[in-house]
Image: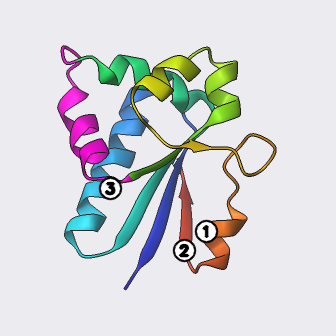
Amino acid sequence: MKKVVLFAFNGEVMCFVHVLLNALDMEAKGWEVGVVIEGAATKLVPALAHADNPMHGLYKKVKDAGLIWAACKACSQKMGVLEAVIAEGLPLGEDMNGHPGMAAYLERGFELITF
């Protein structure tokens, strides 16, 4: 079985949409897949959490499927969205000086793709 973690750093919504679409596609193909929200991408969480956002349905589908494995605690704090990330119930990644490290995924045989 393929094992992939999609690290989303880019804060541009259309880039992030492709992360979400790929996560759903890979899951549908039977892959073990997760999304880690990092860097500027953390600022997208509050906007996507609103039901009136055109991309909310896609975000909710990925979130409800349990495919968002972590949101960076340090970057969420820096971007001013930590409270929103916590309110969304997203797991906080902080094992590497407040950031979600990649090494643990690599050690478990995951391929990393960054956006």
Tell me if residue 112 comes above or below residue 16 in the rendering: below
Badge 3 local density, few (<14 within 10 Å), some, or many (20+)? some
Q: Identify the amino acid type marked 1.
A: Tyr
Please report contact status of discs 2 and 3: CB closer than 8 Å, yes or no.
no
Q: Identify the amino acid type marked 3.
A: Asn
Q: Which residues are magenta?
A: 51-67
Question: Upstream in the sequence, badge 1 or badge 2?
Answer: 1
Tell me if residue 92 comes above or below residue 35 in the rendering: above
> Which residue sits at x=27%, y=66%?
27
Please report contact status of discs 1 and 2: CB closer than 8 Å, yes or no.
yes
- Disc 2/disc 3 C-alpha distance (Å): 15 Å
Helix, strand or loop at label 1? It is helix
Badge 1 local density, few (<14 within 10 Å), some, or many (20+)? some
> Which residue sits at x=25%, y=56%?
24
Question: Upstream in the sequence, badge 2 or badge 3?
Answer: 3
The N terminus lies in which quarter of the figure?
bottom left
- Viewer-nearest residue: 28 or 73: 73
- Viewer-nearest residue: 98 or 47: 98
Q: Identify the residue under disc 2.
A: 110
> Which residue sits at x=45%, y=75%?
3
Q: Relative to 97, is 22 on the left or the right?
A: left
Label for residue 105?
1
Helix, strand or loop at label 2? It is loop
Label for residue 22?
3
Q: How is the image coloured?
A: rainbow
Q: Identify the amino acid type marked 2.
A: Phe
- The percent position of residue 43, horizontal first and vertical second, equals 52, 22
- Viewer-nearest residue: 12 or 39: 39
- The residue mark sitting in front, 2 or 3, is 2
